[in-house]
Image (cartoon, rainbow, N blue to C red):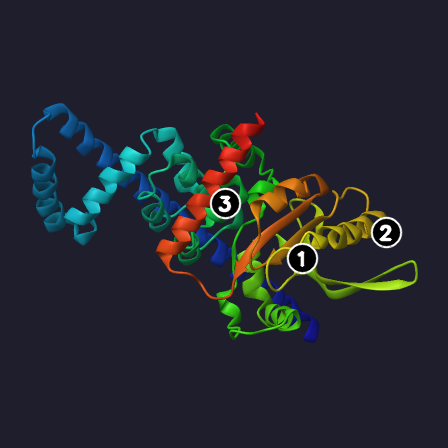
Amino acid sequence: MKEKLQNNKSILSEINSLIIESKQQVVTTVNSVMSMLYWRIGKRINDEILKEKKANYGEQIVSSLSKKLVSDYGNSFSEKNLRRMLQFSKVFPDEAIVVSLIRQLSWTHILAIIPIDDPLKREFYIEICKLEKWSVRTFRERIKSMLYERTAISKKPDVTIKNELQQLRDSELITQDLVFRDPYFLEFLNLKDTYSEKDLESAIIAELQRFIIELGNDFAFLARQKRITIDNRDYYIDLLFYHRRLKSLIVIDLKIGEFDAAYKGEMELYLGYLDKYENIDGENKPIGLILCTGKNPEHIELLHLQENNIKVADYFTILPTKEVLIDQLHKAIAIAKETLSKKF
């Protein structure tokens, strides 16, 4: 009797899974069909506007069509929504690209992406969203937080950005420049004006899930205050993670205040130890991330940190205003690109 009951539970569980999976497929299919419909409507209206070449004709036709369509099919075809369809077809004029896009992103995702003017920035968000399977809410939050401008790839030449996004799209191969950010936003830790490195570390552990979301979905937490012993002397690594796609151990060293050149030697020691004693076959060399509250670009350049697989990034426990943040990030991108141009 117990065995029969257990079998029934197993069958029921499998049937439940099949039903849920089928419902998800139906939702995905309906979404794809509707998104393609909206693109075709937008394209047809755009074609008509271009054909007429009359001033204000676009305003007139959208208003006229909307009134009739709302009457026949409801508010999905309001004037505002028709304009979004127009924008959709303008931003993505190639139907083949649209077909690929709507397989993985919902119409609501698309609405969040079409206002972005920069094609590379737009492509970045699309590919990372597909990779990390962001919800619409997360997608909007990432755009609002200026994730692209905070990611190392934005500071590279346009050709490099295109190539790395192409590689990600074609084979899901991700580079360090697509993973690491600067600055990191840690306002969710709710730290007071004065805090210690221990306070910072404890707050991160308490909010580990949100910290990993800020780092990126492929980070897996391994240890806090990991002890390593070198020549009978103990050292402690603040936080140790593993990145699945990079296949690397990630050491995170937490610092209060500005970056100091001495931090390089400390991180090199950690990375050297892990490479020698902890790495297993198939893994890449460990990567170090030093989080601090300020840094001098010339220090970073002269220390050749990149050659040693070491990253340095600022973190904010209190977010600056949007205007200040935009100014800081755009300056950082400009400086990085100018530095790169001098090298080549």
Say whether residue 274 is left or right of residue 11.
Answer: right
The correct choice, above or below, for 9 with respect to 249 in the image is below
Residue 105 image offset from top left, x and y in percent: 41, 45
Mark 3 or 1 closer to N-term?
3
Q: Amino acid at mark 2?
A: Tyr
The amino acid beneath tag 1 is Ile
Label 3, label 2: how far apart the Cα atoms are:
33 Å
Q: Please provide percent x and percent y for residue 138.
A: 44, 57
Q: Is residue 264 left or right of residue 147?
A: right
Residue nearer the viewer, 153 or 319: 319
Of mark 1 and mark 2, the one earlier in the sequence is 1
> Measured from the top left, where is residue 284 in percent x and y?
74, 42
Q: Quadrant of the C terminus?
A: top right
Q: Determine if residue 26 is in view.
A: no
Query: Which quadrant, please, contains the N terminus?
Result: bottom right
Q: Write the residue at 27% across / 33% down.
A: 90
Marks 1 and 2, how far apart in space?
18 Å
Mark 1 or 2: in front is 1
Give the residue number, with chain letter if any, for mark 2: 277
Q: Secondary structure at mark 3?
A: helix
**Picture disc at residue 252:** 1
Instruction: Give the label on residue 128, or none.
Output: 3
96 or 201: nearer the viewer: 201
Residue pictured at 52% horizontal, 75% vertical: 192
Which amino acid does the dot numbered 3 rest on?
Ile
How many marks are shown on the rendered structure? 3
Check the image and report above or below for 8 versus 322. Answer: below
Q: Give the answer, above or below, for where 171 lies relative to 5.
A: above
Q: Is residue 62 left or right of residue 123?
A: left
- From what the image shows, is residue 146 above or below residue 239? above
Please tell me in which quadrant of the rendered image residue 229 appears: bottom right
Q: Which of the two labelled residues, at mark 3 and mark 2, occupies the earlier sequence position?
A: 3
